[in-house]
Image (tube, coloured by chain):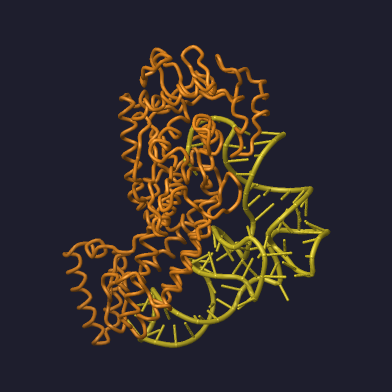
RNA sequence: GGCGGCGUGGCCAAGUGGCUAAGGCAGAGGUCUGCAAAAUCUCUAUUCAGCGGUUCGAAUCCGCUCGCCGCCUCCA
């Protein structure tokens, strides 16, 4: 039975969707104004496994993720600038070019991390009409007010504001040492619609004049449009808990009159060498940069060795030990597949079913991927033992199927490499095989110096030879 | 200042009331091997930041202290 830690109640709860077996899951997506970084990796890998595991548990899941291509201001005083606009000005291009460029980069990097694409990736700019409709309803209901072409949500109409993040709306309302920005009744009131001044490039007509939507509207609108008024799971980074998700709750529940989200899931943050990663500290690392040193699967494995709700520190030491550990996993599966080929069925005799059950028990407990990985390593040991001993074909096929179902299917790791990739093309393969044969002759003649020299030379080229009872095998490092 | 979280072996990291505190990396030793590599076996925390308390029993619950981190402005 799946239990999920619900940020709203601060407890693990048994997961029950509104309309089983259907599950609606909405996850806050990226603002596409810059390259994806380490934080995106942790967040979207975490939710990818949640998505995969829900499906593996028999649910029919609709996974919706937004692409924020408008609407995030830098300042709070109404004078702030949209990040995308700022970037567009710097790069001297249309805002939509910025959004689309970084959206492509986002998907490119997520694909490398083997994150499944959401069922719906919806862009904020494609839902301006729905946002305007929502604002109209909020005004009708008295939850929002217009002021000079701006529309604000009136926080005093939603006393529950703060229930997700443990904040008190009275404190927020009374914290008025800061003078409310132009036309706001309370400084904590947040914008639903902003007037577009002269040079603002992204603008749409509305009943309140030309403008653009506020920060938090898109998630309310798109989750309700594609999932429903009460969605099962809403996810995002912990940093979105306040104010973003509080505002979503206020808007949505004020309009519908019932619970917006049943299970709130927040992933914790990432640090780099123990420090917050930020551009101003100069320690900002994009995924593209990270992938030049660490394979995307190493990164994915590393992230899954931790828990989504724990903070995670990216350091060279941690990443490279993850690489070594993951290598052991990959080698075992590669040897397995050299022997048995494609995975068989996914029903297992008791001996192997036990591993599957243990894996599911771990993931059922608030997606304990770290525990799941220990099961994989137990299977590695079994695999190597069987390969070195009985070579029982049935067992090998069950092991192969388990790696496929649990490791690849649910954790989203990639074990298989094509022969071309692992052997660097046929010419390379032919040449190496030639050298291996020459070395065999040297070994047969007990010419150890020659044999070792060939091995050492190949090693320096990144080709590793291993002598086994069945002959010599080789692989690229 | 307000809100929230974390502190487990050399490093990373599960475990959140009760069998001998998972697993990965690193390290030591053994087996295998012409030697290596790989694999495998054994060993490496009487102890879970510290101090009190609750309990028959706590790493796990409560309080305090120390240290670290996040959010409170856009951020996954």
Letter of the chain shown yellow in the rendering:
B
Q: Is residue A20 left or right of residue A75?
A: left
Q: Is residue A466 above or below residue A215?
A: below
> Which residue is depicted at the point 33% across and 83% down?
A392
Q: Is residue A456 above or below residue A70?
A: below
Where residue A217 sits, quadrant-wise, is: top left
Where residue A339 sits, quadrant-wise, is: bottom left
Letter of the chain shown orange in the rendering:
A
x, y percentage for residue A291?
37, 50
Q: Is residue A252 left or right of residue A8?
A: left
> Which residue is depicted at the point 48% across and 30% down?
A216
x, y percentage for residue A367?
49, 57
Residue A309 visible in the snapshot: yes
How many marks can you see? 0
Question: Considering the image in quadrants, where does the C terminus of chain A appear?
Answer: bottom left
Q: Is residue A370 above or below residue A335?
A: above
Q: Is residue A287 left or right of residue A97?
A: right
x, y percentage for residue A338?
27, 73
Looking at the image, which is closer to me, A445 or A199?
Answer: A199
Residue A266 visible in the snapshot: no
Q: Is residue A319 above or below residue A284?
A: below
x, y percentage for residue B6?
62, 53
Where residue A226 sits, quadrant-wise, is: top left
């Amino acid at each position: 039975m799946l239990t999920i830690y619900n940020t709203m109640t601060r407890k693990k709860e048994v997961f029950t969707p509104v309309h089983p077996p259907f599950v609606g899951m909405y996850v806050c997506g990226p603002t596409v104004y810059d390259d994806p970084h380490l934080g995106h990796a942790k967040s979207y890998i975490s939710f990818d496994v949640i998505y995969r595991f829900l499906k593996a548990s028999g649910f029919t899941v609709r996974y919706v993720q937004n692409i924020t291509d408008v609407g995030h201001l830098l300042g709070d005083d109404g004078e702030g600038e949209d990040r995308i606009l700022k970037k567009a000005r710097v790069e001297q291009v249309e805002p939509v070019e910025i959004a689309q460029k970084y959206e492509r980069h986002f998907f490119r990097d997520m694909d490398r991390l083997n994150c499944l694409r959401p069922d719906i990736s919806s862009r904020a700019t494609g839902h301006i009409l729905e946002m305007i409709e929502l604002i109209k309803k909020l005004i009708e209901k008295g939850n929002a007010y217009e002021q000079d072409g701006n529309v604000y949500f009136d926080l005093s109409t939603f006393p529950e504001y703060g229930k997700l993040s443990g904040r008190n709306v009275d404190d927020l309302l009374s914290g008025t040492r800061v003078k409310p920005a132009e036309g706001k009744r309370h400084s904590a009131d947040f914008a639903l619609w902003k007037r577009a001044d002269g040079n603002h490039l992204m603008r749409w007509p509305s009943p309140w004049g030309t403008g653009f939507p506020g920060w938090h509207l898109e998630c309310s609108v798109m989750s309700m449009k594609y999932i429903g008024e009460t969605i099962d799971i809403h996810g995002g980074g912990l940093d979105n808990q306040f104010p973003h998700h509080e505002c979503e709750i206020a808007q949505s529940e004020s309009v519908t009159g019932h619970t917006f989200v049943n299970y709130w899931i927040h992933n914790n943050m990432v640090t780099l060498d123990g420090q917050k990663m930020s551009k101003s500290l100069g320690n900002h690392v994009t995924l593209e940069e990270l992938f030049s040193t660490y394979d995307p699967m190493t990164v994915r494995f590393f992230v899954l060795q931790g828990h989504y709700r724990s903070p995670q520190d990216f350091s060279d030491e941690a990443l490279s030990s993850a690489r070594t550990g993951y290598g052991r996993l990959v080698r075992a599966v590669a040897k397995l597949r050299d022997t048995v080929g494609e995975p068989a069925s996914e029903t297992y005799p008791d001996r192997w079913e036990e591993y599957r059950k243990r894996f599911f028990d771990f993931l059922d407990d608030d997606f304990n991927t770290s525990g799941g990985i220990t099961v994989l390593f137990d299977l590695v040991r079994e695999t190597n033992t069987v390969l070195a001993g009985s070579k029982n074909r049935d067992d090998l096929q069950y092991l192969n199927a388990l790696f496929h179902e649990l490791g690849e299917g649910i954790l989203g790791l990639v074990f298989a490499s094509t022969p071309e990739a692992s052997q660097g093309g046929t010419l390379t393969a032919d040449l190496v095989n030639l050298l291996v044969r020459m070395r065999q002759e040297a070994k047969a003649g007990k010419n150890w110096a020659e044999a070792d020299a060939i091995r050492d030379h190949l090693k320096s080229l990144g080709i590793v030879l291993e002598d086994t009872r069945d002959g010599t095998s080789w692989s690229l490092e």
